[in-house]
Amino acid sequence: MKRIVVSLAIIFLTVTAIWGGPYRLEKSLSIPDAYFFTPALSSPRYALFGYVSKARPTPEEIAAERKRIRRILDSAVKREYGSWKKYGEAMKEAGKEAAARAASEEPAWARTLMPPSLIEEAVPLLMKGALMWAMAHSEARTEPFGNVGETGIVLLDAEGRYTKIPLGIDQPVLSLDISPDGRFAAALCDMSVEDEKGRLHTAGRICLVDTKTKKVLLQRIYANACGEVRFSPDGRRLAFLLRDPATWERMAIRFIDLRSGRLEKGAILFEGADASESFYGRKRRIPHFRFADGGRLVALFSSRGKGVLCFDARSLRRLSLLKGSGPRFAAAKSHPWIFDERGRLRRCGDGATLFALKLPRDVFHEIPEAVFFREDKNLMAVDRMGC
């Protein structure tokens, strides 16, 4: 079969003068069978790109991918329960034990997103039915394989050496992150398919990659996983986002313990906003959640509360609601602070405003971009006028 080669070109620039001086081309790389697909991510040691290859996979490659997905799911069930039969029995028992408490404590939309039979179960599966579609169900109207081709990530070091790491077939990368020490990279790939009635079955595969060996260390497939993977500041946990397939504003954050590879119990449930915005032709994605205070806090925007919610990252207990703060905010690394789009430095916990910039009350003077640096002793912010 003839393959079409599509290349991803990466350009290195060298700054020849510090203050606005000219740039010169240092190096240009062409990576065969890799087409840039997701936003790039960089760290002090590496850059990371998601890619899609337009080369159509062979029937043998498609068959091998189906087997690989089934092995991932089978091994997860066997590790936790011993067999699919025992898994089903355990789910029924867990449902009896948890349904009453979940029904009385959780709202209806939360029960839809996190079924009572699974709320207290530390399993790498949320809904068996959706995961069966991830294994290329024969009745899927949209064939999940063969439309795009190989997908994965390109890992690039500071010297310009790159490694292409395939992660699947027709599973585009949605989100990327690099651990604080640079040792691991995480990628969330989309495995969603559409059935014969036009219903979307959302599923995602999370892969943990060793940046030294360039090997995939851990793979997990989750129903409803649809965006954002993020390492905790200590690098021991990986957080990811789930969304209710019926109402996508309803979301949950869950955590994987990277030492054991297990899904942690509990979730942060909230109703969020769209993760993208466009302002006078400038488009960008807005993170749904951020870690703060050394990883002890999780901050996120709540569309229901119309403000930023702060949670304890371990107990998942809600701490405070900072009303009036929108989805565009910066979180301090070592302090329980956020800096919101109205120019206010606010403290999670008691919700106190530590200081506020005197900004005109118009959209042009909102602050869509801000970052803490120098151990949170300094902060840089840019308003919509580029000032």
Image: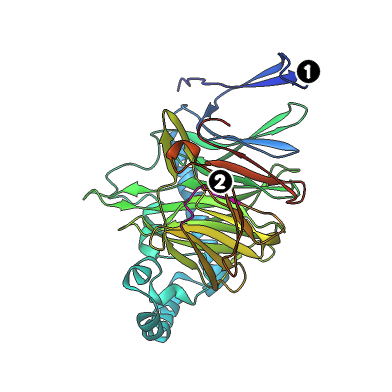
Q: Secondary structure at mark 2?
A: loop
Principal SS element in the magenta part? loop
The disc label shown at residue 17, or none:
1
The disc label shown at residue 290, or none:
none
2 left or right of 263 in image: left
Q: Secondary structure at mark 1?
A: loop
Residue 221 makes an appearance in the image: no
Expressed as whole percent of the image width and height from the top left, the position of residue 310 reads 55, 64
User: Between tags 2 and 1, which lies in front?
Assistant: 2
Image height check: is 22 above or below 272?
Answer: above
Precedes in sequence: disc 2 or disc 1 = 1
Image height check: is 305 above or below 90?
Answer: above
Return the residue at label 2: 358
Expressed as whole percent of the image width and height from the top left, the position of residue 195 reads 27, 50
Q: Residue at x 52, y 74 (%)?
A: 81
Residue 386 makes an appearance in the image: yes
Expressed as whole percent of the image width and height from the top left, the position of residue 321 reads 50, 66
Q: Residue at x 53, y 69 (%)?
A: 320
Could you say which is closer to the camera, residue 231 or residue 326? 326
| Mark 2 crowd level (few <14, some 14–19, many ≥20, 10 Å Cα) | few
Image height check: is 250 above or below 183?
Answer: below
Q: Quadrant of the N terminus?
A: top left
Expressed as whole percent of the image width and height from the top left, the position of residue 49 reads 59, 34
- Under mark 1, the amino acid is Ala
The magenta span reads 324-330
